[in-house]
Image (spheres, rainbow, N blue to C red):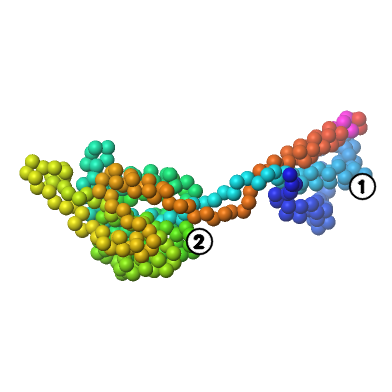
Amino acid sequence: MMFEFHWPLCFLLLPLPWLYRRWLPPAETRSAALQVGFMERLQALQPLAAQPGSPGRKWPYLVVWALLVVAAARPQLLGDSLPTAVTGRDMMLALDLSGSMEFRDMQLDNKPVDRLTLVKHLLGEFVERRRGDRLGLILFGSQAYVQAPLTHDRQAIGEWLDESFIGLAGRETAIGDAIGLAIKRLLDEPAASRVLILITDGANTAGSVSPLRAARLAAEHGIRIFSIGVGADTLAPDGVTSSLWGLQFDPSIELDEVSLREIAHLTGGAYFRARNEADLQAIYQQLDTLEPALREGLPDRQATPLYPWPLALALLLSLTLSSNMVRRSHQHD
């Protein structure tokens, strides 16, 4: 067990009453503006009001003030050390909002939905599970921008994710710019915790930075990229996975899996392919198992607050002084 004051600087307030009395001018004594029948009794009480300032009677008030300052300084007993709290990764999520994400080749609860709807639904669950991590959200299309900086507020990330929609950042795909923006946001974070999850269904068609060049820069700064390619393998023209006519086509023909694999390889991450709800759910579960980046904080101890004791003593002594003044005033009558 160890005793300490949580806010020791509060003791700088101890000389405040002396400074108040020393530097502030005394209150002006003015004649009574009203004439009342019991003025003589009030004048008789004036010596009692001055008594606290006399040398013999001011020490109880100084004790009250000292007790209040001690309580404000938050005395506490520190017990055994608690388990050291660790934080998880600093993770940026980059989500593609290009026009192809509205393609309805996915299913959610056995109902056909577009790619963005499924990704947002399962990504929201993934965000909710990442307790202890700082998450950030980048939305990209023709341009890339930070929708949410790194934060522990998972609820806010989920709300911003829900509010995103196709075309919000343009209908093209600036993968390289999204990676570059993530690098800028993660550059000042501890190297072991730099992670980017890149979710797209296409190839780089916009932006000023090529994806592979951005990936090499990310690798130089120790940022790992986990890329996810979204899109079904085959689909019938009417949006159903099978057709009476047997006509099918590849809805993911624009997905640049070669580049996404290379991006992940260059940065020491991994590439995942999400063809359906089960694939995407499994991918998020795999990402949940990422080894956390252990960033130890200051050691913490179990603290037992003691401030109620001096606070209670100050209150008790104040009540005693008040009752004594009332009793003396009655005796004087």
CB within 8 Å, label 2 to label 1: no
How busy is the neighbourhood of tag 1: few (under 14 within 10 Å), some, or many (20 plus)?
A: few
Residue at horizontal 9%, vertical 47%? 247
Q: Is residue 328 magenta?
A: yes
Which residue occupies 31% across, 53% down? Answer: 272
The image position of residue 166, as x and y in percent, is: 27, 52
- Which of label 2 and label 1 is nearer to you? 2
Judging from the image, what secondary structure is the residue with disc 2 in? loop
Residue 127 shown in magenta: no
Q: CA distance from mark 2 to mark 1?
A: 61 Å
Residue under numbered circle 1: 55
**Residue span colored magenta:** 326-330
Please give the name of the residue rendered at 84% of the width and 46% of the height, measured from the top-left corner.
Answer: 62
Corner quadrant of residue 36? top right
Residue 296, located in which quarter of the rendered image?
bottom right
Decide if residue 270 is on the left or right side of residue 44: left
* Residue at numbered disc 2: 190
- Say whether disc 2 or disc 1 marks the residue closer to the N-terminus: 1
Horizontal and vertical percent position of residue 322: 82, 35
Q: Amino acid at mark 2?
A: Pro
Q: In this rendering, would 52 be left or right of 249?
A: right
Q: In this rendering, would 87 be left or right of 143?
A: right
Q: Is residue 5 left or right of residue 226?
A: right
Query: Along the line of sight, which residue is nearer the eye, 252 or 331?
Result: 252
Q: Is residue 264 above or below residue 88?
A: below
Q: Which residue is painted at 29% across and 66% down in the image?
A: 207
Check the image and report above or below for 267 versus 10: below
Snapshot quadrant of residue 93: bottom left
Count of picture labels: 2
Q: What amino acid type is highlighted by mark number 1?
A: Pro
Q: Look at the image and tell me in which quarter the C terminus lies.
A: top right
Q: Residues within 10 Å of mark 2 (few under 14, many from 20)?
A: some
